[in-house]
Image (spheres, grey):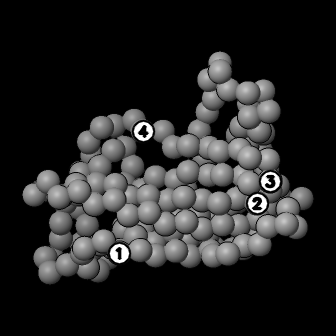
Amino acid sequence: MEDYEVIKTIDENVQGDFVFRLVSEKKEYGKGEDVKLYGEITYIGDKDEVTIRHSSSAILFTLEEKTRGFEIDFGVDDLEVATVLKQGEPYREEYVKSGGYSENTPNDDVRFIKDFWKNDGFPSGYYVINGETDFSLENRERVNIKATVDFKVAD
């Protein structure tokens, strides 16, 4: 883990009238400590509010644990959900543990995911989090903004 250096705990990108921020509140967490990670979408256009249509979550998170090469993807349940964004007010979603495995998943990956689910916090390691918001507007315009943060979890 010493080979990895935390690059950024906040990433912000803009597409049109929308700002997407991804934030890890710390560069390093202790084993068993709650990881404080969230994404925000802010509408900065001229209207008082806009309605966005998205999958089960307006903000999706993918985790990569780089020291062991594990990846935990997001799951999508509902196909279309509507969320109202008010001008200038960030819409926030906190990261909640997700991910699973199938019968084809390698044993090392299964052990990591079971450890991930069983314990509080994250297993020790260096994590890169890819956040994404992917939605459409009433006029069918599609917005897809990505951001990346990283952090460590020490033993």
Q: Image point 71% across, 44% down: which residue?
A: 70
Q: Amino acid at mark 4?
A: Val
Q: Residues within 10 Å of mark 1 (few under 14, many from 20)?
A: some
Rounded to the nearest angstrom, the CA distance separating label 3 from label 1 is 31 Å
3 vs 141: above or below? below
At x 68%, y 26%, the residue is 105
Q: Residues within 10 Å of mark 2 (few under 14, many from 20)?
A: many
- Pointer 3 or 4: first along the chain: 3
Other residues around mark 4 within 10 Å, as few (<14) / some (14–19) / many (≥20): few
Q: Give 107 or 82, whichever is nearer the viewer.
A: 107
Q: Furthest-top residue in view?
A: 103
Image location (x, y in percent) of residue 7: 67, 75
Q: Which residue is mark 3?
A: 67
Q: Secondary structure at mark 3?
A: loop
The mark found on residue 14 in the picture is 1
Q: Earlier in the sequence, mark 4 or mark 1?
A: 1
Q: Tell me if 75 is positioned left or right of 150 in this view.
A: left
Cα–Cα span, label 4 and label 1: 24 Å
Q: Identify the residue position indicated by label 2 in the image.
A: 126
As displayed, is residue 52 above or below residue 9?
above
Nearer to us: label 4 or label 2? 2
Who is closer to the viewer here, 79 or 1? Answer: 1
* Separation (CA) of disc 4 from disc 2: 25 Å
